[in-house]
Each structure stands twice: as structure tokens, then as C-alpha cells.
Amino acid sequence: MSLRVDVVEGFSIALKSLRAHRLRTVLTTVGVGIGVATLLAILGITQGLDTSFEKQLASLGSSSVYVSRMPWVQLGNWWEFRNRKLITLEQLEAVRAQCTLCATVVPLLDDDVDVSFMGRELVGIDLTATSAEWPAVSTFEIDRGRFLGQADDDNRRLVVVLGADVAQTLFPDSDPVGQSVLVGKRPYTVIGTLAPKGKILDSSQDLRVVVPFSTFRAYAPGRRSIGIGILVSDAGALDAAEDQLVGILRRARQTPPDKPDDFAINRPDQVASTYQQLTGALYAVALGIGFITLLVGGIGIMNIMLVSVRERTREIGIRRALGARKRTIVVQFMLEATVVSALGGAFGTAFGLFGAKLVSWVSPLAATVKPGTIVFGVGFAALVGLLFGIWPAARAANLDPVEALRNE
Amino acid sequence: MLISLQGIRREYHVGGEIVAALAGVDLAIDRGEFVAIVGQSGSGKSTLMNVLGCLDTPTAGSYVLNGKDVARMSDDELADVRNREIGFIFQAFQLLPRETALANVELPLVYRGLPAKERRARALEALEKVHLTQRLHHKPTELSGGQRQRVAIARALAAKPSLLLADEPTGNLDSATGAEIIRLFEALHAEGNTIILVTHEPKLAARCPRAVRITDGKIVDDGPGAEVAFRDQATGQLRDEAHS
């Protein structure tokens, strides 16, 4: 008998047997279903986290590079970072003069400030002190009024541009442009507001104020390391620009040739990969749990198939006496196991997708499901059935026909 | 010659000892014969029937069935021989409980790989021979014992085997139904089928043209059924039952 006939016949026998034992089929299906659902929900949530984080990082500007003393993601000796030389305006000028791949170069200083207007107060807002070209580097857009100009910087004017959340909170129903707000202890005149941009990992980018770089230096003195924001002339030239920057900065900072870089070149795209390294282990553990759940479902299938083989020993004897080969019996039982678990896989996929959606509704965690995941869910479940069906099927096929016929 | 057994031994290991269920059986059966195999329980007649039916392989000896040496065949080849050459009829009927009479009769033809249409036609033909065309779509539990055994006989006939092998076919039936089944066998024999009937009932064996008696794994008597069934092994005389 051909394998095709084995499969066709085995399939119809499998369906009949599953229909004859409905409760058993449902319970076994649920076992596999839970495993697949867990696996898919975990996959969906982790994929969702990655995707949303990538989107958030893209909002930092896909062709921007930020030079700072410390890397954004610090791995290693904090003291080593702490003792690095400051980054100075001279180094920024060197970059501006020598970096041919840099389209725009702006200075950056960060601080936390309290901002208030007419009794309304926001505490611990991000303050960015920078120059007129900053929107091009950070990809912020102006909503109302205007951004900082060269003259504001040159004259150390007390002017401020409000982030969208700050403007919304302090001026819920009026135009802030032209109004005077307290930034720290000094009154600043609002000259414009920024268009909203959203969050990176739950921290709003719109809860910020932007002031002229020289104004901040004048009123908040002290030796601070500045940051350098750079818009690279072409997104494809990011690596080349980074190489160029490393050379310029090492020369400007007189870093000895035998020492590693004592500054950090931060790229949003690389932060994503660092983030994935950090979260990878966590995902692996979560996936491991999913696989174990599926394994338990598989063992359930194996158990029920062994029961099925025992119950149908006589049937196997009859089939063997009438000319069924061992392979025919193997195919019959493996198909039965595969059909049960594929069924469980289908249900599990539906529940897993639903679970992932549920998580994204009730929590800040995002969840996305790629179409391939569904194929993976059902296919993987079927594979589990196939694997865990092998042993019971082999036992069935290797029964001695004479003994099997004698079975009550 | 349809069947030729020479020096067939079947040995089992039981608790470190070797027990011979068949201790050198020589037997030849021609096409068209109707032969009873008789013996006490434990005599080896079941083992002989399993070997004849290719369900079991002998430890030693040669078995040629329909020109093929089956003693040295692989498991797959034996399955094919069972499918094509042998029609089994068991004491316990051995029907699939969840399948209809028709589906049960079709089963060996499924394993032969015949197309559905041909399977159906041959199964119907076989069921007609056992007068069961009114019960095609009944499951075994909806049939009487005699009807079940007739389904089993139809299943054996459908494969058009060279040998019908019946193991105590009337053992689970009342005497009237048993007699009916035996008449069916006699009719099938008259049509030219080769039949081997394994039984412990002398009366049944007596109705067969030929019978062989097996004791302790060896054939000890071979002759017309009426004589072998009632011959006293110790004296060689026919017992009184023969005349009653």
C-alpha cells in the first residue's frame, strides 16, 4: 500500500477516533492550546515592545548622532565614565570646522528645572540649552511662534520655547507666546511652542523647555561637560561620520593613542541594539516558559495516545491480521496525535493573539503579531504532536499481532 | 500443493527453559481441501494456526504457501501475504466495533490499495454470498452472533484469498447458529475454496473430509475426518461416539 493511501486512510481513522472520544479530544486540545497561547502571547508582547521602542528611538532622528561624556546606556565601570575629561565648546568648534559629513552641529546642556505660570507649576522638567539649529538635529517641529534665533543666543536673551505638554499644562486655554513664565528663579519670555512628539519608554519628550545655550551658561555657571548634537548629511553616512568624529574628538581631547575613547558617540539605532541585548535574556526566559508549557501539552498528548493504543490493542491486531503494515499503523497514530495538537494549536493561536491584545489594552506594554506568528503557532503545535506521537505510534506498530488479537 | 510445512518448530523461552509449542510439524494441504486441525488446548494447534496464517514465524523449518517461502519473509512481506493469501475467521469475530458491516468487509481491500468503487463492489459481492445484504450499514453491536460471524466470513472472502483459516468459528455461537455457519463453510468448500478449520470439537472435525490431530506439538494422526475425530490414540480403535 502506498504512503498516500496510508495517509488518507489514517486521516479518516484519526478523525473518527477523535469524534468517538470527544471529551478526551477537547481536554488534550486544551493542553496544547494553553502551551501555544502562552508562547504566542509572549512572542507578541516581546515583538510589540521591540517595535514600539524602535519607533520611539526613531523619533530622536534617524540620521542624528549625539556626543557626550557618558554613553546613554552605561555598561561597565561608572567611575571610569565619571573621571573622563569634560567635553568643551572648543571641541564642538573642532567638530564644526573639521567634520565634512556633519550637516548641522549644535551644543547641548541638560538640566532639571521647575517651571511655573500664574500659580501653575511643573516640577523637574527637562531643560535643554542649545542653539538655533537644534530642531533639525532633534527633529522637533515648531507649533506656535518661532524657535530660538542666533540673536537670542548672542545676546543671552531670557527667552524660552515650551514643549507641548508644558504649554498645555501652563496655558490650557490661552496662547503662551509673549507670556512670561518662571524657569527656575528667572522670568523668561515664551517665544514659541514645540509640536508634540510622544514618549520614549514612558517618559514624555514633550515635558521640556528649550532655552538659548549662552543664556543658560551665563545664569547657571560652573564647569559642565556639554553635549554635541549632530545631524549627519546623509543617513547612509552614519558609520563614516562616526569614524570621522572619533578622529576629530581624540585629536581635540588629546586622547593618548594607547587609550580607548574617553567620550561616547550615541546613536539611536545602536541604542536599540543595546536595548535588545539587555532585554534578550528576559525574552529568552519568557520564551523558555512558553516552551515548557507546550512541552507539558505534548506530554499530555503522549499520555493520551498511549492510552489510546492500549484501548485499541485489539483493533491494531485486527488491522495487522488483515494486512496492515507496521508503517500503516504508525501513520494512523501519528496522524491522530498531529490532528489533535494542530487543533490545539489553532485554538491556542486565537487565544494567544487575544491575550496579547488584552495585555496591550490594560497595560502600557504594546503587542504586535506578525502574520508569520500564526503559521508558526499552528505549525509548531502540529510538530509537537508529531514528535510526541512517535513513541506511542511505534509501540502500537510493534505489538505482536497474535498477542494483540487475544487482548480483551 | 498449496501448503507445505516441513520440520516446523516454534519455540518459546519460558523462565530460562525452551518450550517447543511445535516440535517438528510436517503437513501438506492441496488446493480445494477442507481440513480440520484438532487437538486439546495446549496441544499446539493455536500456534500451528498462527504459523499457517503468517501471524507468527517458525523458529525452524520451511513453510511454502502458494509457491512462496514465507518462513523467511520480512514483516512487511508477511503483512502482504496475510492480505492477499489468507482470509481469517476468528472465534471472537474480530470486527471493528465502530465500523459498519460493509466497512469491515472492505478493510482488507483498503490495505490492498484498491480504489473505493472496486472495494465496494467486491465487499457487496462477498456479503451477498453470506446472505447479509439486508444488514450492510449495521454496526457489529447491532448484529446477532451468527450475523457477526457471517460478516467476518464475508471479510475473509472479499480478499479472494487462496486459504480460509477458521479458528473455532462456532465457539461463541449456539449450536443451531453454529450448524448454520458450518453449512456455509461446506458450501464455500463446494465452490472450490480451500478451508482449514481449527477446532476442539470432534463432531465438527468429523464433518470434514480430512482431519489432522496435533498432540504435544506434533501431528499424531491424519485421515478422513470421521475417523481422526473419534480414533482413540492409545488403542487405535474408533470410540463409541462415532456410532452414536
Image: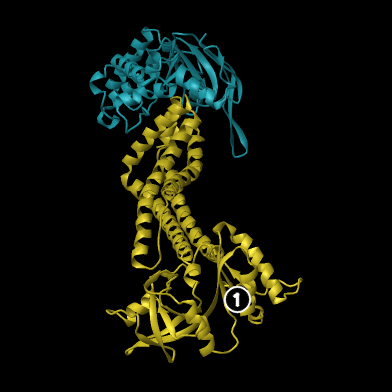
Q: Please, is residue B4 above or below residue A31 in the view?
A: above
Q: Please, is residue A235 above or below residue B62 in the view?
A: below
* Nearer to the camera, A165 or A40: A165
Question: Which residue is drawn at the image coordinates 40% and 30% (left, top)?
Answer: A8
Q: Color used for chain A?
A: yellow
Q: In the rendering, at what x and y percent does residue B42 appear?
A: 49, 29
SS state under label 1: loop
Q: Quadrant of residue A360?
A: bottom left
Question: Which residue is drawn at the image coordinates 51% and 38% (left, top)?
Answer: A394
* Nearer to the camera, A235 or A79: A235
Q: Quadrant of residue A274?
A: bottom right
Say which residue label 1 marks.
Answer: A70
Q: Please, is residue A75 above or below residue B24 in the view?
A: below
Model colouring: by chain
Amino acid beneath label 1: Met
Question: Which residue is drawn at the image coordinates 72% and 76% (left, top)?
Answer: A254
Q: Evaluate whether residue B167 shows in this view.
A: no
Q: In the rendering, at what x and y percent does residue B55 appear?
A: 50, 26
Q: Please, is residue A112 above or below residue A197 in the view?
A: below
Q: Color used for chain B?
A: cyan
Q: Evaluate whether residue A291 shows in this view.
A: yes
* Nearer to the camera, A254 or B15: A254
Q: Tell me if mark 1 has few (under 14), some (14-19) or many (20+) residues whose alpha carbon lies within 10 angstroms of its own.
A: some
In the picture provided, is A120 more to the left or to the right than A51? left
* Nearer to the camera, B8 or A349: A349
| Chain ID of residue with mark 1 | A
